[in-house]
């Protein structure tokens, strides 16, 4: 089954909307991006999984000024998994208040909900070394 172009566009805009809402401090609008039972996996950062929108919002508020001031997403690839459930990979850049920058890969599971497409699972994978370590001296 092929995913319709309109769905691909809606999913790509959904991925982009996350950064706008977070950077604007509009955490109460997270339901426009995530399902209520969201699993937000920060295991690669040693923080485990955050489950649910309330816990996600609390984690963001607790991080406070350590949050990036800008979230940028690029290289969005939508891969159909099954019907109303797709896998989406994208690259994220986070700019901190001091000007430092970090890079992640977002690995998302996106589902079609009553209100439209929403992310039900997001895993952040830190990009720490070039070429994912390929060619490095051991």
Image: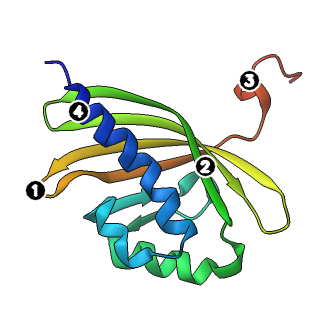
Asked if the residue under mark 1 is in contact with the one under mark 2, i.e. CB atoms within 8 Å, the reply is no
Q: Is residue 50 above or below residue 95?
A: below
The answer to which of marks 3 and 4 sits earlier in the sequence is 4
The answer to which of marks 3 and 1 sits earlier in the sequence is 1
What is the spatial separation of the Cα atoms under label 1 and label 4, in whole angstroms?
16 Å
Q: Nearer the viewer, residue 38 or 45?
A: 38
Q: Residue at x 30, y 32 (%)?
A: 8
Disc 2 crowd rating (10 Å Cα; few below 14, some 14-19, many 20+) is: some
The answer to which of marks 2 and 4 sits earlier in the sequence is 4
Tag in front: 3 or 1: 1
The answer to which of marks 1 and 4 sits earlier in the sequence is 4
What is the spatial separation of the Cα atoms under label 3 and label 4, in whole angstroms?
33 Å
Residue 92 position, x and y percent, is 60, 45
Residue 117 position, x and y percent, is 23, 48
Q: Label 2 belongs to which residue?
A: 72
* Picture disc at residue 114: 1
- Left or right relative to 44: residue 108: left
Asked if the residue under mark 1 is in contact with the one under mark 3, i.e. CB atoms within 8 Å, the reply is no
* Picture disc at residue 6: 4
Asked if the residue under mark 2 is in contact with the one under mark 3, i.e. CB atoms within 8 Å, the reply is no
Asked if the residue under mark 4 is in contact with the one under mark 1, i.e. CB atoms within 8 Å, the reply is no
The answer to which of marks 3 and 2 sits earlier in the sequence is 2
* Picture disc at residue 131: 3
Quarter occupied by the C terminus = top right
Q: Residue at x 19, y 26 (%)?
A: 4
Q: Residue at x 64, y 81 (%)?
A: 64
Quarter occupied by the N terminus = top left
Residue 118 position, x and y percent, is 27, 53
Point out the residue furthest to the right here.
137
């Amino acid at each position: 089954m092929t995913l319709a172009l309109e769905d691909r566009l809606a999913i790509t805009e959904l991925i982009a909307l996350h950064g706008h809402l977070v950077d604007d401090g509009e955490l109460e609008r997270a339901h426009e991006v995530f399902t209520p039972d969201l699993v937000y996996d920060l295991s690669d950062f040693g923080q485990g999984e955050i489950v649910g929108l309330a816990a996600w919002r609390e984690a963001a508020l607790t991080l406070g000024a350590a949050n990036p001031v800008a979230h940028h997403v690029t290289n969005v690839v939508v891969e159909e998994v099954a019907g109303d459930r797709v896998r989406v990979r994208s690259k994220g850049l986070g700019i901190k208040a001091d000007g430092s920058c970090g890079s992640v890969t977002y690995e998302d599971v996106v589902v079609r909900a009553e209100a439209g497409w929403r992310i039900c699972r997001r895993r952040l994978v830190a990009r720490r070394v070039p070429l994912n370590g390929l060619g490095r001296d051991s």
